[in-house]
Image (cartoon, rainbow, N blue to C red):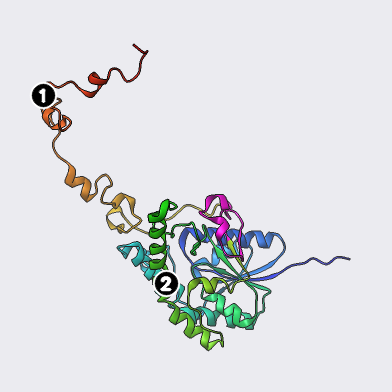
Amino acid sequence: MIRNFYVLILVAGWDSGGVVEAVQTVVRRAVARGHQVRVLGTEGLRSRFESAGAGFRVYRHAPDNDVRRAETDLVRDWEARTPLGMFARVRDRVMFGPARQFCRDLVEELDREPADVVVVDTLIPAALSGAEAAGVPSVLLMHGTYLLPRAGAPPFGMGFLPARGSLGRLRDRAAWSLTMALFRTGMPALNQARAELGLAPLRNPDELAATAERVLVCTSPSFDFAAGAVAGNVRYVGPQLDDAGGGAWEDPWPGAADRPAGPGRLERHRDAPGGPAAASRRRPRTAPGSRADDHRPRGRRRGDPRPAERCGPAVGPPR
């Protein structure tokens, strides 16, 4: 008789808003295949993962976070004025600042109940060191595109298209260097936690990702830049999104006037309709032809033929 094969999976999750859906889908699909899954996370995630069929344990040491309410959001990214400022908040409050607490929670949970593999949310990569110290294979789950440097890809979060020419490549190298330097300043906190676990120090965030048995990227390689240049432990697994319902969305902001402005708020963008730059450009509209001199191309005097009159019709049969 063939016995059912299942894997004991421990998921270290984090309440990061919409991208939780990708982790929840992975958990739901693993449970549907007969694996035993339990999730270690913040209290606000309990119902989402229990509804997916997983067991749930609350962090005892790591900081709490509930993005459903402004007052319980740990990162408060809308208060950052620049993308780099937002990255710094994530680095200090989530990714590396509380590294010791995440590692302690993971090690204690594995001591309480072992697992065959540990799956770590990409926003709390420090938890990989807890799995490494416990000798358990780990998987880093990236919700969307690949986030680490590789040749031919612009840095994430900057809005750049792939470089063209030497100046574009120089731009990407400089931007990647700046971004990685910002995250590298969080490594001392991680290395302190690693030292307490008896692990060697690391210099860069990509070295931490290299400790994972696999890095699963939840998108298609056709959707990502330079997908062929990623690290050897990376696998593209496609979008992990199930339309499982879950009720109506609840706006955490009581009114439009209270909604904070931030780097991602398009309606508050300076060039958006109603934004400060747009307001400064407003002026009374004049009657047609009343300011004809203002609309005449520079260098053309009154009475000169228009360009179309000099060149003939733009479209039509040859003369």
Instruction: Kindly report which numbered mark, 1 or 2, lies closer to the viewer in this rendering.
Output: 1
* Count of numbered circles on the image: 2
**What are the residue bounds of the magenta stretch?**
217-244
Q: Secondary structure at mark 2?
A: helix
Quarter of the image with the N terminus is: bottom right
In the rendered view, would you say 237 is above or below 87?
above
The residue where tag 1 is placed is: 302
Residue 74 shows in the view: no
Q: Looking at the rendering, in which quadrant would you find the C terminus?
A: top left
On residue 183, the disc is 2
Residue at image x 42%, y 52%?
A: 165
Q: Nearer the viewer, residue 9 or 220?
A: 220
In this orientation, which residue lies closer to the viewer: 284 or 252?
A: 284
Q: Residue at x 49, y 56 (%)?
A: 152
Query: Of marks 1 and 2, which one's residue comes earlier in the chain?
Result: 2
Residue at mark 1 to residue at mark 2: CA–CA distance: 60 Å
